[in-house]
Image (cartoon, rainbow, N blue to C red):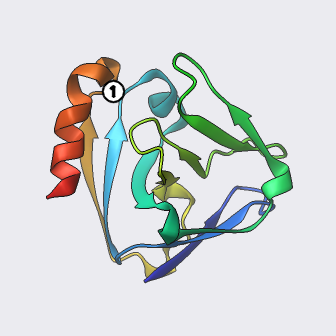
Amino acid sequence: MIHKGGCHCGKVLFEVEAPEDLEVTECNCSICSKAGILHLIVDKSQFKLLSGGNHLSTYTFDTHEAKHLFCKTCGIKSFYIPRSHPDGYSVNARCLDDANIKSINITQFDGKNWEKNIDQLRASREK
């Protein structure tokens, strides 16, 4: 199923292929908890930026592996390239239009202790 989404001002728009019943992760690390991200992890092939690439700004910190992409106009982080899945995207499920979403199942992730817990998260996604 194709879900449409974007930032608050509408300059950044995208599509993502995902089921109507979403499996997302809520992380308690410093940036995710402050931004309220619900991570829908997808392969690059499942994501398509429709417009607004020129309105994106990149923020990195700590290891500089994750590429946090924000709309320059409204500041919303609709999606980014996560350190845990550098060949994919983390789409913020809160930035999806809800027309095609049947349900959202949220799994908690202890990102405050990222290094200790990342292997467990990856293993659970491979099932």
Q: Is residue 12 above or below residue 82?
A: below
Q: Percent position (x, y) of residue 60?
A: 63, 26
Vertical side of 31 occupied by 96: above or below: below
Label 1 SS: helix
Lateral position of residue 107 relative to residue 26, left or right: left
Q: Quadrant of residue 85?
A: top left
Q: Report x, y in % for residue 98.
A: 49, 73
Q: Position of residue 82 (x, y in %)?
A: 48, 40
Quadrant of the image containing the N terminus:
bottom left
Q: Position of residue 47 (x, y in %)?
A: 55, 67
Is 10 placed above or below 117 here?
Answer: below
- Direction front: furthest residue: 87
Q: Crowding near pointer 1: few (<14 within 10 Å), some, many (20+)?
A: some
Residue found 42% across the figure and 60% down from its top = 42
Question: Does residue 72 appear left or right of residue 120 in this picture?
Answer: right
The three-letter amino acid code for the residue at tag 1 is Gly
At x 51%, y 27%, the residue is 31
Task: Tell me what residue is drawn at x 71 percent, y 66 percent.
Answer: 13
- In the picture, measured across the screen, residue 117 lies left or right of residue 90, that is left
- Looking at the rendering, in which quadrant would you find the C terminus? bottom left
In the figure, residue 41 lies in which quadrant?
Answer: bottom left
**Above/below status of 127 relative to 77:** below
Pointer 1: what residue? Answer: 111
User: At 54% from the left edge and 35% from the top edge, which residue is drawn?
Assistant: 35
Badge count? 1
